[in-house]
């Protein structure tokens, strides 16, 4: 990916890489934080000069376990000098979940999934809560979005300015 950007991209093109691991890093390295952090650090090094953002490197059986391992992994990456933003998804489904991750300080980004929050106002509030808590929000949706819901999410994005919009 890096070599293709160097070959075809303009000099000032500096994308962020978004890789969703679907929990496979945890499975592959048997949830051992140091081994996972070493591997992710090699991915970081391979992505330089671009920023690698890693979604769901681990997928645990509870929100509390997810938060605990995310926090430990985040600290291990910081010790290695590998600033790979970790993105939480599966255990951040409603406002309480999102606020818990923000309060715990264990994630860099949250995939705010509009269908899971039930109301557009909750989605907007979740994104504002992320920004207020120093967490970069992603406005996510559904693979079954309608043209009407897509327009609504575009207007919401203009209002609350998420870091990314996934469509």
Image (tube, grey):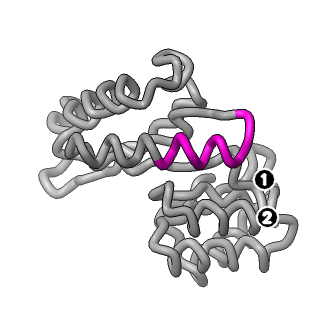
State yes or no: discs 2 and 1 in contact (Cβ < 8 Å). yes
Task: Measuring from the top left, give residue 83's x and y in whole percent.
Answer: 28, 49
Count of labels in the image: 2
Q: Nearer the viewer, residue 129 or 11?
A: 129
Q: Determine the secondary structure under disc 1.
A: loop
> Quarter holding the N terminus?
top left
In terms of depth relative to the viewer, which is nearer, 143 or 86?
86
Judged by its main secondary structure, the magenta piece is helix
Q: For mark 2, what is the residue?
A: 149
The part of the image, by quadrant, that contains residue 117 is: bottom right
Q: Is residue 164 above or below residue 58?
A: below
Name the element at disc 2.
helix
Question: What x and y, as percent, mark residue 8?
Answer: 21, 38
Residue at 16% in and 34% down: 7
Q: Is residue 28 left or right of residue 8?
A: right
Q: Residue furthest left?
A: 11
Q: Residue furthest bottom?
A: 159
Q: Which mark is residue 31?
A: none
Residue 150 forms part of the magenta stretch = no
115 or 102: nearer the viewer: 102
Residue under the point 63% across and 52% down: 167
Residue 53's x, y, as percent?
A: 40, 46
Magenta residues? Answer: 61-71
Horizontal side of residue 39 vs 73, given as left or right: left
Q: Residue at x 66, y 34 (%)?
A: 60
* Residue 71 image position (x, y, % from top left): 48, 49
Disc number at residue 145? 1
Between marks 2 and 1, how big is the CA–CA gap? 6 Å
Q: Name, please, the residue furthest toward the right.
A: 118
Q: Reply above or below: 137 against 42.
A: below
Q: Residue at x 25, y 28 (%)?
A: 42
């Amino acid at each position: 990916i890096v070599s293709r950007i160097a070959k075809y991209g303009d000099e000032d093109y500096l994308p962020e890489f978004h890789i969703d691991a679907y929990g496979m890093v945890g499975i592959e390295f048997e949830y051992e934080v140091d081994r996972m952090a070493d591997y992710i650090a090699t991915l970081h090094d391979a992505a330089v000069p671009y920023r690698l953002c890693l979604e769901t490197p681990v997928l645990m059986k509870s929100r509390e376990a997810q938060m605990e391992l995310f926090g430990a992994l985040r600290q291990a990456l910081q010790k290695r000098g590998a600033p790979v933003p970790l993105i939480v998804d599966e255990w951040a489904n409603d406002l309480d979940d999102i606020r818990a991750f923000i309060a715990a300080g264990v994630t860099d980004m949250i995939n705010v999934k509009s269908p899971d929050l039930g109301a557009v106002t909750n989605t907007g509030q979740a994104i504002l809560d992320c920004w207020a808590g120093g967490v970069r929000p992603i406005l996510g949706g559904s693979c079954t979005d309608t043209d009407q819901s897509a327009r609504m999410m575009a207007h919401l994005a203009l209002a609350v300015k998420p870091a990314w919009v996934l469509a």
